Amino acid sequence: MTTTTTARLQLKGITKRYPSVVANSEVSLTVMPGETHAVLGENGAGKSTLMKIIYGSVKPDAGSVVFNGEPVHIRNPQEARAMGISMVFQHFSLFDTITVAENVWLGLARTLSLAEVTRSIVSKAQEYGLDIDPARPVHTLSVGEMQRVEIIRALLTNPQLLILDEPTSVLTPQAVDKLFIVLKKLASEGCSILYISHKLHEIRELCTACTVLRGGKVTGVCNPADETNASLSRLMIGAEPPELTHREQKPGAPVLQVSSLSLAREDQFGVDLDDVSLQVCAGEVVGIAGVSGNGQRELLYALSGEDCRARAGSIRMGEVDMAALHPGARRKLGLHFVPEERLGRGAVPTLGLAHNLLLTRNEALSGPMHWIHLGQLRAQAADIIRRFNVKAGGPDSAARSLSGGNLQKFIVGREIDARPKLLIVSQPTWGVDVGASAQIRSEILELRDQGCAVLVVSEELDELFELSDRLHVIAKGRLSPSVPIAQATVEKIGEWMSGLWEADHAQA
């Protein structure tokens, strides 16, 4: 048996300029067959742009691409897929109004029937532990479920090069373990993998090579197995992220009280909420863990006011019954909300950052005509950009022009800056680099120390263990009892994710 030394992919001198930034500057990178190669860098370092160039969805201004030893000009994603290159984007490329199977079918060869694609999805889903119903419309899926669809779609093309942009950001530890088994098997069969992640422990476990980008330029190449989290962090951001200080303090009066909340699903693929009760007090962080698609979406809609069907008295903020109040009325009470979907719900893609403040803030509106004070808006946006180190062209930059992590920093900063009495955050650091993640978590804890009640819904257990004073688990629309963080373990929370908390609770 002979081994090939021809590189699977070679990038030479790739440069891509935009009006306000040079995303990639003279980037060179080599990936060998069967290699799992990490691309590491802070938010806005140029990682996603580089991956889109390889996938044909962005054209470079300079440089060359060589695939399997042949110079190529990849004009679009269809050509990339035909060559054997597949990509799972951080921001999903799915059509909301059609089914999972139809979305996958669009990206595959026309020789396959929809029935054949449906069978393939079921088979792959079972094989890889990424269970999904092919008949479900995409608009009914949670973010985690959408990511499963993207991963399955990529795997069905049997790629020679698989590009994964933050693939585990909304997966549970158990699902990550299953995905890593799949990726290691793919690599052993000769598939090359380009892997973008801000989770340094994942890169060290999975990847055999690493290229580091900072400010669009290559600043280092290493073997992650020879590095520590601290040394990788220094390569990426020039420093180690500050350690969180989680001080114990006695919580104050209850701010949010949910009592026996039961809600029938609004669509056939949703989840019924079943007798959900929880309490969040001033000066505490309460976390909710769970596998995506177990009622988080429905609970968050009920708490934010997007679903106002709750029984009278079942959702209270202080002494106020807010079960029937719309989101604007809840904001006036001091409730601020960060949704898991950045673009579309968290921000209007085409609007500038300053105008996006109007989604949840109205200080810049005055008088009977509600005139908009643009100067005030721009000043507020500029302050958030500075305070949260958001890389953007300025307050008028369109939301969609920001990298995913930088947009997340802005949205979280916008809500924290409003000085809420109650902050509800879904997936606070999804796709955010280690430095920015530490900053967001630190700001949440500082808000809690100032007396704000904080509810965090996340599929990242490490995040919940760092932030929470108490933890619940949601499974099949039911909420577990809370457990103090000092008594919580990954094993216990993992078991509870399957709904197995009654036995533990009975023994307690």
Image (spheres, grey):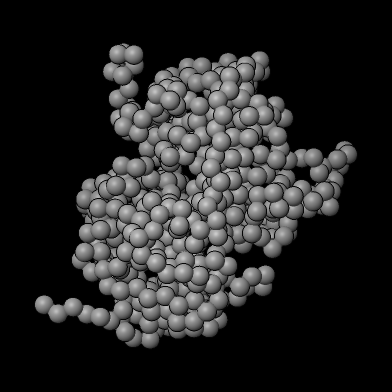
Residue at (34, 80) in percent of width and height: 67
Answer yes or no: is residue 210 visible.
Answer: yes
User: Which is more toward the observer, 104 or 418?
Assistant: 418
The image quarter in which residue 35 lies: bottom left
Quadrant that contains the N terminus: bottom left
Q: Position of residue 32 (x, y in %)?
A: 30, 74
Image quarter of residue 171: top left
Q: Is residue 193 left or right of residue 332?
A: left
In the picture as drawn, the residue positioned furthest to the bottom comes out as 71
Position of 287 relative to 124 (above/below): above
Looking at the image, is 111 positioned above or below residue 114?
below
Q: Which residue corresponds to the image point at 25% horizontal and 58% vertical from the top-left?
A: 184
Which of the image's four quarters has the C terminus? top left
User: Residue sitting at 31 percent across and 42 percent down?
Assistant: 174
* Image spot of residue 279 (x, y percent): 53, 20
Q: Quadrant of residue 276?
A: top left
Q: Position of residue 3 (x, y in %)?
A: 18, 78
376 lies left or right of 457 = right
The number of discs equals 0
Residue 9 locus on image (x, y percent): 35, 77
For this rendering, which residue is in front, 463 or 342? 463
Q: Is residue 492 left or right of residue 266?
A: left
Q: Which residue does the image show at 74% across and 50% down from the upper left?
A: 383
The answer, for residue 345, to whether it is visible in the render is: no
Q: In this rendering, is residue 185 above or below 264?
A: below
Relative placement, left or right, of 145 versus 286 is left
Please, which residue is most extreme toward the right here? 367
